[in-house]
Image (spheres, coloured by chain):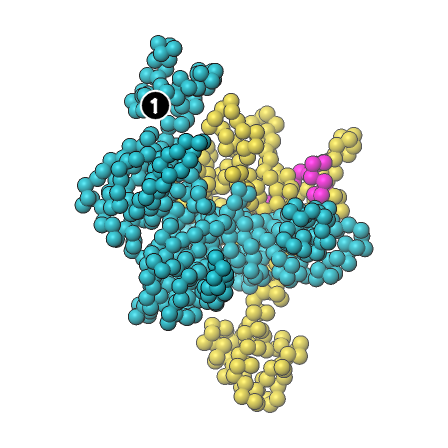
Chain colours: A cyan, B yellow
Amino acid sequence: MDERIAPHVEELSRVLGNRYTEEIRAELEKLLQYRVPLDEAKRTILNRFTSRSPASVQVKDLVGGMNGFDIIGRVISIEKKNVTVQEDKRSVFTGSFGDGTGICSFTCWDDMSLKAGDAIRIKNAYTRMWNNRPELYFGKRSVIEKLPDDQLQDIAEMSHAKPKKLQDIAPADVMASSEVVIVEMYHRDISLKGKMLTITEGVIADETAKLPFTSWTPLRGADIGSFIHFEGASIRIFRGLPSINFSDNTTISLIAQPEKLPFTLHSVSSAADPVPILNVLDKSGIFDVTVAGNIISVRPGSGIIERCPVCNRVTQKASCRAHGPVECVSDMRIKFILDDGTGSLHVMLNCELSEAVYGKTMYEAEKMARESISKEVVFDDMKRVLTGKYIAIRGNSSKNEFGVTLVAKSAWCPDADLKGRMDILLKRIEGQVSNNG
Amino acid sequence: MAEREMAYRIFACEFNDSRFQVSSASDAPGQADLHAPNFLVTTAGAKVNRLFIAGVITEVEDIGSQKGGEKELWRARVSDPTGTFTIYSGNYQPEASVFLSTVEVPSFVTIVGKVRSYEPGDGSVFVSLRPEEINHADESIRNRWMVDTAELTLDRLDIFDEALSSGLSGTDLLDHLSLKNVPSNIAEGICIALDHYHTDRDYIRGLKIQVRDALLSIGSSLSASPGGGLADIEQSVMVMLHEMNQGKGVEYAVLVREAGEKGIPAELVEKAVRSLLSDGSLYEPRVGFFRAID
């Protein structure tokens, strides 16, 4: 056996830059034992060991499913956990890792004798999605290189990294600091482990973005319109949208001279101008964004629908996925694709917005459906009314396996200063055409 | 994740000049993904799979029945001020075919469609659209499409100018453009266009002139359109009259001065006031004073 596979191991190792020879041999032997054809086995190994991602990445650029990249930073915290993997007791090391662009959580499968504060270069790391965020993994196929301590900023600076703009908070981040203004705030009583607790929820903003926040500690002296500086807030990701969590470990202070900030309560509260859809597609999720474009397709599932009275899920043939046959509740919605020539995304309109955009109430639509004994008639009518129309939508966007979806909070027909835009364009062309000629 | 192909806005002249098709899976021959979209790369670097057009439908022909009536096939022509898009709709586009069989000619329509190209074998290429959505439109939708399309086209042509002046090509050009934050699909399209069509400054300039002429052709209908600028000015005049009213209405000269500060010229104020008077939103309590009716 050994004799026969030796040249292949050598070949693979050479292709991979003379690395991992022993591991390649072990993998190849295992695959051949399972009677995987030699060519396929070699391909599998090549794929596994080849790095498909950029050679060196930073925390802010981490996404799920990356392989074989290098990353430099500091271990901020680390702890040992005992887990059972297939009835096998093992220890893993988890913690957080920062490089000045962000702080992510990591899992290391082997004891690399790392401790908090170590400046390291991890070669051949990979990422997996965990708790909706990319998490950094490394193990025995990775190489850890300790760096001289003075090569990186010190740990305090990394763990409380300098304030980030809200739009720069990346999916991999677990902690962040920033300077923001509170634009919405309300209190809610919840029961946590049998204890009543008042939490504060709301929305914070800077000139780049808005994000929802939850505070588990009382926000003394802060109210709507307060400018605050926070440090070490934890971040949770849901549907690609970060939400900021203030806890006992977060330090929060009021900003003494808010007039020095590049934003005011007024500037962040006013409705933003539409952004090109391309910019929305780049992000995994945006809280409160405005886009405008043409409705290029009204999608199936629009029109009169039925929902489960318990869980609000859409029902099929009067039967809910979770609750079986139910007394359905009627609802109306519109799903369509909005396209502005830079990109396209899905938009969801609830009943109220559907009525406004479609121009018929749900009552009228239901009547129409009853009279023709078909719900299709409402869908067809919506297509006729809406396809091709120009519309502006404000809401939250999120990315999933089907693309980017915007759940609308409001919708309107934007003012058209076509004449003004046309004059600008004509001037632009005039300048260029005469310059060139 | 299969991302949805966005709908490009381009003018008919640029579309009809184009004949170069690429498949996104062309770099992996033998394993070509059947679902990989095909693109038409235009002379000015748009990499188009899907188009959104608005224009006037000028001709519908039932060419299916000419060949014995077995196959349903409709050909339609939709024109914008720079040229004409050709549309083919067969039995796989039942809704579009029904639409075309009943549409009045001429009328405004919007179409979302996939790009098709046909090579008869003599070296020529015919490009057409296969509709996914087709709907009635009105002049205001067409006008907005024109302005949007002109803006997007000019943005792209500016990048093309940039690419031409850089003197680079291939991956060097791609790197150069990505440093300038040019979206990758446009950068790729421009690279291919340079390579395949040898598009030069003269062509780009010609295209700009066509865009200008197209805009000028709808210019008159824009200023005259009742739903356009005047309605906005009427609304601002109403708001001003409400705000400035101290019981006896507002003096016309004061109104004009206030409007002037907001950038509204006097002749438009006069137009708005006349129109508001005629539809009964205003009255003249004293000569030269106007008051809004609550």
Whether residue A398 appears in this view of the structure is yes
- Say which quarter of the image contains residue B126: top right
| Viewer-proximal residue among B36 and B56 | B36
| Viewer-proximal residue among A3 and A402 | A3
- SS label for mark 1: helix
Query: Is residue B88 highlighted in magenta?
Result: yes
Q: Which residue is drawn at 44% across and 60% down?
A: A214
Query: Is residue A158 highlighted in magenta?
Result: no
- Check disc 1 and give the amino acid type: Glu
Q: Which residue is drawn at 40% across and 53% down?
A: A235
Q: Where is residue B151 in the image (x, y as percent from the top left)?
A: 49, 52
Q: Residue A302 vs residue B207: left or right?
A: right
Up the image or down, A14 lies above or below B258; here it is: above
Q: Name the residue under label 1.
A: A23
Whether residue B81 appears in this view of the structure is no
Q: Which residue is drawn at 26% across and 37% down?
A: A113
Which chain does tag 1 point to?
A: A
Q: Where is residue A79 in the image (x, y as percent from the top left)?
A: 32, 44
| Viewer-proximal residue among A302 and B218 | A302
Up the image or down, B74 lies above or below A247; here it is: above
Q: Which residue is drawn at 54% across and 74% down?
A: B236
What is the span of residues highlighted in magenta in the rendered image? Answer: B82-97
Q: Position of residue B152 (x, y in %)?
A: 49, 50
